[in-house]
């Protein structure tokens, strides 16, 4: 007895002014948020403000990527996005610096810092490549 296969609804196509690179960037930011979220929950109580700042900056990056997809003129949004990614890099670096929490171990282990930094750098490279494509 063969079961009837249900047809899945077709996904909405990407808007005309958005490119495939935008969608990939959004997925990378989403992956970063999912990967980093549990790590932020592990921060000591004294460093909760730093964890909230990192979380807020990641959400801001996601918001700017979504905004970028929907804008016709993208250069100003790309500049804001690049700034937010740079702030995120510095916040994560601060969380992994042992001098920031002198009496305790760093909020992020070296391995977690490497993985998170690698993901942030991928996003930064995507933004840089997209910016170069707009200059042509």
Image (cartoon, helix red, strand yellow):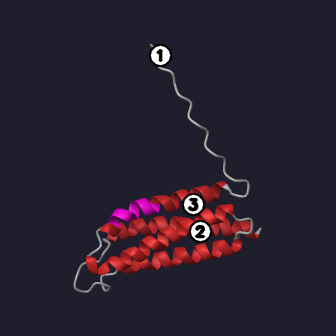
Mark positioned earlier in the residue sequence (2 or 3): 3
Q: Residue at x 66, y 47 (%)?
A: 13
Please tell me in which quadrant of the rendered image residue 90 appears: bottom left
Look at the numbered discs 1 and 2 and tell me whether their residues touch, using CB distance below 8 Å: no
Residue picked out by circle 1: 2
Asked whether the viewer can see residue 59, the reply is yes
Is 109 covered by the magenta stretch? Answer: no
Residue 25: image tag: 3
Mark positioned earlier in the residue sequence (1 or 2): 1
Is 33 covered by the magenta stretch? Answer: yes
Residue segment shown in magenta: 32-39
Q: In 3D space, how far apart are the residues under numbered discs 3 and 1 (Cα atoms)?
A: 41 Å
Position of 95 compared to 22: left or right?
left
In the picture as drawn, the residue positioned furthest to the left comes out as 103
Q: Residue at x 43, y 78 (%)?
A: 91
Please tell me in which quadrant of the rendered image residue 67 appears: bottom right
Q: Nearer the viewer, residue 28 or 68?
A: 68
- Location of the N terminus by quadrant is top left
Residue picked out by circle 2: 64
Q: Percent x, y for residue 18?
A: 69, 57
In the picture as drawn, the residue positioned furthest to the right comes out as 136
């Amino acid at each position: 007895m063969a079961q009837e296969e249900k047809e899945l609804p077709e996904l909405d196509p990407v808007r005309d002014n958005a490119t495939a690179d935008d969608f990939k960037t959004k997925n990378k930011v989403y992956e970063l948020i999912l990967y980093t979220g549990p790590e932020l929950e592990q921060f000591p109580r004294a460093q909760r403000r730093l964890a909230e700042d990192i979380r807020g900056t990641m959400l801001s990056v996601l918001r700017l990527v979504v905004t970028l997809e929907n804008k016709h003129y993208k250069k100003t949004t790309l500049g804001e996005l690049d700034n937010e990614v740079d702030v995120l890099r510095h916040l994560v670096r601060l969380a992994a610096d042992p001098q920031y929490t002198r009496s305790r171990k760093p909020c992020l282990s070296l391995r977690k810092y490497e993985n998170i930094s690698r993901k942030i750098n991928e996003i930064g490279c995507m933004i840089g490549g997209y910016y170069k494509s707009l200059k042509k």
